[in-house]
Amino acid sequence: MSMKAKRLLHTRLRISNLEESIKFFTQVLGMNVVRQTKSPRGSVLTFLRIAGSEEEIELCYYPESGKVDVPPDLIHLAFEVDNLEQFGIHSSKLGYPFSDGPTITSSGTKFAFIDGPDGYEIELIERKENDSI
């Protein structure tokens, strides 16, 4: 029996606005809601996943805990995209323009950031073939 973690299952993000956050993750990032439950203490837990991926994002909505305000550079989530320029046009139309970048690495990989609801930073990466960023 191995005494190490097998894989990452999900990452929890506490949020201030359930509708806004679900809209962001589904419409901007293209994730799918896979289930929604209520915790014993009353939090609404919404799990989202990108098609073809096993890892999930768990949105935790618990209004009694107050507004969420994530400080800059505390945490970010990174997503791979096929075309960073086209993604930037798409996200801008939905109210989420690039907040930093795009930047091109020496290997040709491109990346940029958008600020999601509650201040969560989202990194978008268009990887050059065979780049391991």
Image (cartoon, rainbow, N blue to C red):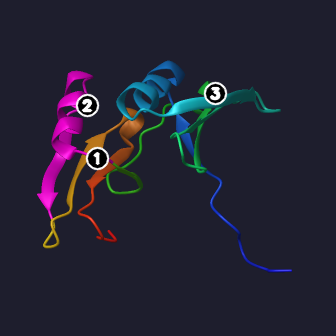
Q: Which residue is mark 3?
A: 64
Where does the image place residue 109, in percent across and percent down from the top left? 20, 63
Where does the image place residue 91, in percent across and percent down from the top left? 25, 31
Depth order, front residue of 116/128: 128
| Residue at the far bottom in the pictured view | 2
Amino acid type at circle 1 is: Asp
Depth order, front residue of 65/127: 127
- Separation of disc 3 and disc 1 at Cα? 39 Å
- Mark 3 Cα within 10 Å, few/some/many (few <14, many 20+)? few
For residue 18, above or below residue 31: above
Q: Residue at x 32, y 68 (%)?
A: 133
SS state under label 2:
helix
SS state under label 1:
loop
Q: Which residue is mark 2?
A: 91
**In terms of sequence position, does the residue under pointer 3 or pointer 1 come before the other?**
3
> Which quadrant: the N terminus?
bottom right
- Separation of disc 2 and disc 3 at Cα? 30 Å
Q: Residue at x 65, y 54 (%)?
A: 9
Could you tell whether 92 is left or right of 23 in the image? left
Q: Residue at x 34, y 71 (%)?
A: 132
Taking the magenta stretch, the answer to whether it contains residue 124 is no
| Residue at the far front in the pictured view | 129
Q: Which residue is mark 1?
A: 82
Q: Nearer the viewer, mark 1 or mark 2?
A: 1
Amino acid type at circle 3 is: Glu
Q: Which residues are magenta?
A: 81-104
Where does the image place residue 7, in percent across and percent down from the top left? 65, 64
Q: Nearer the viewer, mark 2 or mark 3?
A: 2
Amino acid type at circle 2 is: Ser
Could you tell whether 46 is left or right of 30 in the image? right
